Structures are given as C-alpha cells and as structure tokens.
Image (tube, rainbow, N blue to C red):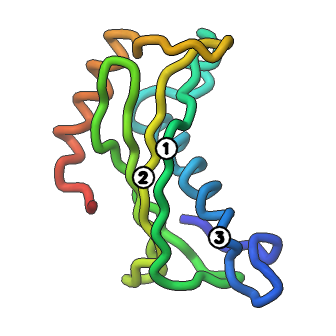
Amino acid sequence: MHRVAFYETDAMGIVHHSNYVRFFERARVVWMDEHDRPYREYAAEGLHFATTALELHYRRSARFDDILAITTWMEWVKRASLRMAYAIHRDDELVAYGASTHAMVDLDGRPRGIPPARRTALQATLTANSAAPG
C-alpha cells in the first residue's frame, strides 16, 4: 500500500506521471525482499538488475491522499534477465499498469548471468504466482 504524498502531485493535484516509475521500482525491491532475497544482498556481491525497458499505461488519475495498492509479479526470468509486471489500484479501480525488464550487470555495467541458485529460486516464483493479475 502507498498513500500518495502531497509532494508527489503536480499543480493540478494529480500524481505526476514520473512517480509511477518510482512506485514500480519500490514495489520491485519489496517483491525481491519477500520472494527472493533482499536486493542489498545482490548489491553486496557487486550485482545489480539494470533497467533495460519500461512500459507504463495510465487508466485513471491518482490524487493526494489516495491509498494505492501495488501488485507486483514476475513474468519471466532468463539466464541474465527478468521481467516484472505491476498493477496499481485505488479501491477496485485500475489506476495504472506496466512492466519493467532488467538485466543483471556487475559494477562496471557488464552483463552477468543470474547466479544459478538465484535463477532457480526466481523461477520457482513463476509457478507460485501463476494466478497473478496481468
């Protein structure tokens, strides 16, 4: 859940479009904490998931003080990349949805394979979350 702060809105009192990317990013990190391992553990190993693609679709405006529910799930995982999907709702109303694709890289930005044990763990979430909205 995310309660929209005043600073996240524009002059019209509507959540600025750029903040939805932040909502997605925060949700992805929380998802990793809950379903794989804390992102900081990847970072401690010198590995990061660099964003390589992002899609975002707006359906309704969100405003200051709205309570938003952000649902996150993994769509796929490959040797060195993964794709996360997101749906943002206010009550039962779809506000926005989208997806982000990420490639594993080292500290120099060079592509790296997702460590096999981590990839296996991530692949296991695909079955567990097969009923996710999307």
In the foreground, 13 or 35 = 13
Give yes or no for contact between labels 2 and 1 (Cβ–Cβ under 8 Å). Answer: yes
- The crowd level at tag 1 (other Cα within 10 Å; few <14, some 14-19, many 20+) is few
**SS of the residue under disc 1:** strand
Q: Which residue is drawn at 38% across and 52% down?
A: 85
* First in sequence: mark 3 vs mark 2: 3
| Amino acid type at mark 3 | His
**Marks 2 and 1, how far apart at CA:** 8 Å
Element under disc 2: strand
Q: State which quarter of the image contains the C terminus.
A: bottom left
Q: How far apart are marks 3 and 2 (CA)?
A: 15 Å
Q: Residue, x 44% and y 40% (percent of image)?
A: 101
> Taking 50 as reference, is 118 left or right?
left
Residue bearing mark 3: 17
Amino acid under label 2? Ala
How far separated are the C-alphas under marks 1 and 3? Answer: 17 Å
**Dot 1 or dot 3, earlier in sequence:** 3
Residue 63's place in the image compared with 42, above or below, is below
Residue 52 spot, x, y in % from top left: 51, 37
Q: Name the residue under label 2.
A: 99
Q: Residue at position x 64%, y 55% from top?
A: 22
Look at mark 1 in the image and give the residue it sits on: 53
Amino acid carrying mark 1 in the image: Ala
* In the rendered image, the vertical position of residue 75 relative to residue 72, given as above or below: above
| Mark 1 or 3: the one toward you | 1
- The first of marks 2 and 1 along the sequence is 1
- Please provide percent x and percent y for residue 43: 63, 19
Q: Is mark 3 on a helix, strand or loop?
A: loop
